[in-house]
Amino acid sequence: MALTVAAFGALNTDSYDVFSERMGHYAEKHDIGVSLISAGPYPNSRGESEPGRPLRAEALKDEAKRKELCAAVAADATLVGAARCHFLAMPCMSMIGFHDGIETVLGRSIVRLADALKEKYKNVERVGVIHMRPAKQRIEEIFGPRALTLDDKLADRLQKAEEEAKKNHNPFAIYEAMKNITLDWVDGGIHHILFARADAPRAHLSSAAQVEGAIINTHFDILAEHIILKAISGAPQLDS
């Protein structure tokens, strides 16, 4: 098999790198050759809003900016050759709410991260999700009452950690905050934890993941495995 995947819409290049690693892991596990092409960060390497490339939070509140975002992400996908790939993927939790608009512009389906998450946790009674603020509503829509999301207190804790990480150019503060939340949730009986923060794509390799009793997945892992399993099932037909 020769599988081609286009990834776009992620916040930073590290997210693409981790997603590529996980795609390679599952492809090797199932003896599938895979080639992944990635777009640049959205909105840009500085993570700042620009004309025609608004931040996600802005696009969630303004229909005109939503259309601008969808057009910009679709253009990023087209630029890297998404039209020639078997699968299109957006390894970003905060982009879940924009899939419909981006698909409309592209004229092609995107593998839904929401579907991958639902499938992964379909038999799990309760899942704790460490997410970024724009993704909270989407997570609640995906999992309903089964999801434990961040309340304002925990979201503020992570925001302070994010500011410290930016100041020090080191994600350690975010990892420690995620670890402490994971510890609290495991103590409260929540053992399935989804790491879904774009500003800490390698949290699964950090202190945050070293919590006894926690069953940790990342959205990168879940989406990558979902795509490989779709390929194995024959959708779409792959080159031999």
Image (cartoon, grey):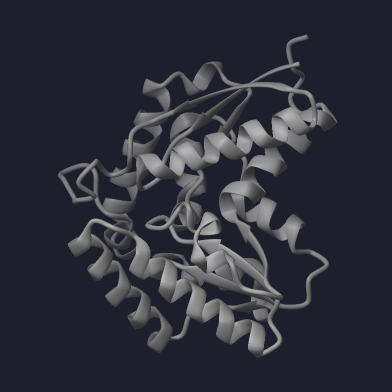
Q: Position of residue 153 (x, y in %)?
A: 39, 88
Q: Residue at x 78, y 71 (%)?
A: 124
- Describe residue 47's horizontal placement relative to residue 139 as left or right: left
- Describe residue 229's horizontal placement relative to residue 156 as left or right: right
Q: Residue at x 45, y 18 (%)?
A: 81
Q: Quadrant of residue 145?
A: bottom right
- Describe residue 81's horizontal placement relative to residue 169 as left or right: right
Q: Quadrant of residue 229?
A: top right
Q: Residue furthest top?
A: 240
Q: Residue at x 56, y 32 (%)?
A: 88
Q: Work out whether 88 lies above or below 237.
A: below
Q: How many marks?
A: 0
Which of these two is toward me, 68 or 165?
Answer: 165
Q: Quadrant of residue 134?
A: bottom left
Q: Work out whether 214 lies above or below 34.
A: below
- Residue 149 appearing in the image: no
Q: Work out whether 16 lies above or below 85.
A: below
Quadrant location, the C terminus? top right
Q: Residue at x 34, y 60 (%)?
A: 171
Quadrant location, the N terminus? top right
Q: Work out whether 170 lies above or below 17.
A: below
Q: Position of residue 56 (x, y in %)?
A: 33, 56
Q: Position of residue 39 (x, y in %)?
A: 39, 30
Q: Position of residue 223 (x, y in %)?
A: 63, 46
